[in-house]
Amino acid sequence: MKEYLVAIDAGNTSCKVVIFDTAGNVVATAVSPVTRVKKRGIGFEEFDIADVWNFVSKAILEAIESADIDASGIKGIGVTSFGNGCVILGENGKIIAPGCLSQDYRATGVVEAFEASGAMKEIVKLTKAEPFAGSPIPILRWYKDNEKDVYDQIACVLTFKDYIMYQFTGVFATDLNCIGGSVLLDMDTMDYSQELLDICGIPELYDAMPKLAAEATEVVGVVTEEASKMTGIPVGTPVVAGVMDVLAGLVAAGATEEGAYTLITGSWCINQTHSEEAVEGIFLNMPYLKRGRYLNCSNTGASGSNYEWFTQVLGDYPKIEAEKRGITMYQVLNELIASVNPADAKVLFCPYVAQPGIVPGAQAAFVDINQDTSYAELAYAVAEGVGFIHRHHVEILKAKGLPLNEIRLIGGTAKSTVWNQIFANILQVPIIRVDCDEACALGSAIVAGIGVGVYDSYEDAFAKAVKIKEPMVSNPEMVEIYNQRYELWCDLNKAMEQFWSKRK
């Protein structure tokens, strides 16, 4: 009988269910929405918790049906999602409030209070990271300060993926990587810390933290009878602890070698490598695949999401052109972007449609537009701006002494040869692309496969399931042009800081 692995990649806008065979091939996919709750005020980014499981379970049934497979061949389940944000539940898993997405910034005042009181320094000392408004701790403190009736009911605090795992298994569990990346662990002990919660003013929640798995590959539970009825996955199928989507992407890219960086052009601008040290002055240090190593991250809250915004708000022209020609909108956009000569480009784009930005309060902006500016130049400026924000973060990591030999690129825009060439020219490092459209799901499936014995190790899984394409290299004639453009872009961001700080 053929063997399969089911992976769920839960994002801010949708949850993808992907069935893989053991060679890393996609057998079937299905997508369920993440239902946003109507905003209750400025900064609120919430989702309907009950809808998540209803939609995900239906998507699993749909994927199994479309794959036309024997479900008894499913050997394990891996779930990955964004970190931060949070799901809070009452006794017996009772839903007591909407889920919070990582882009929620209602708790900006809490973070500012931590800074003003000196608590932030103590938090960073313990967690090796600075919580932002969308991190669980500020959100939980916000509930205590603003909705005490909800706060007093909290019996369990979960990340998004942990909630889906709970629905499969009935077990409140998490993994070191995702919960540590959500700034909830003492990174020296790799455990929860009463001291941390005391500093943050939420000491009552220590017992509300989910069980910590020792390794990402640990089986934390099995599919219950109720979950089996809803999903079609057999009772007793193992569910592994898993990892956050950023680390799942690294796994899918096979980027465990020294000097390999993984860049993810998704909802967030993710730039990461790994080392034996927690590095000061970067966005985040997270637990890695193995104890004793850290995932070193320099990130902001938007990458490919800038392109998504652009196509939704300013995408009528390529949509109309695509319909006329019988091709996709993205093919039209690729042609338009490729038509712009970087040496002649004038427009610059600040790629901050989502928070956190390069500095607090940063927002997206086009600069240097006049009556002769074409739509193609705007599209190119978005692609270039996204490339520049990734370079900004890569240079932060390099400046900390983290070696860089190659970049493995995944995410929606990484499917475009045009975008890959722009990235290669901007970053001036070989860009190695992963031959899988569902990379984070693949990484989650690999982690699950190791946990249930389908693969012997990460190296075994990489050999069997990870496929990469030929690297893209920079065009020597473009290097100086892009260096000059990047310098201008950096100057623009610095000039905009005063404006952004005034409008907060």
Image (spheres, rainbow, N blue to C red):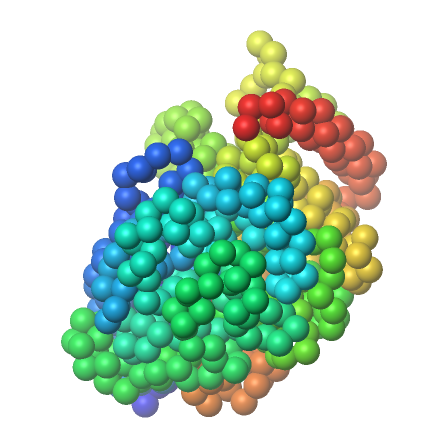
- The residue most toward the top is 371
Depth order, front residue of 153/108: 153
Q: Is residue 197 left or right of residue 270?
A: left
Q: Is residue 299 left or right of residue 159?
A: right
The residue positioned 45% from the left and 35% from the top of the image is 309
Can you give x and y, in whole percent of width and height, for residue 91 in the image? 25, 69
Q: Is residue 474 left or right of residue 37?
A: right
Q: Is residue 4 visible?
A: no
Depth order, front residue of 465/455: 455
Q: In this figure, what is the number of numbered marks?
A: 0
Image vertical order of residue 195 relative to residue 137, above or below: below
Depth order, front residue of 261/268: 268
Image quarter hosting the N terminus: bottom left
Depth order, front residue of 36/474: 36
Can you give x and y, in whole percent of width and height, for residue 20 in the image? 40, 73
Q: Is residue 145 visible?
A: yes
Can you give x and y, in whole percent of width and height, for residue 261 in the image? 69, 61
Image quarter hosting the C terminus: top right
Image vertical order of residue 244 relative to residue 290, above or below: above
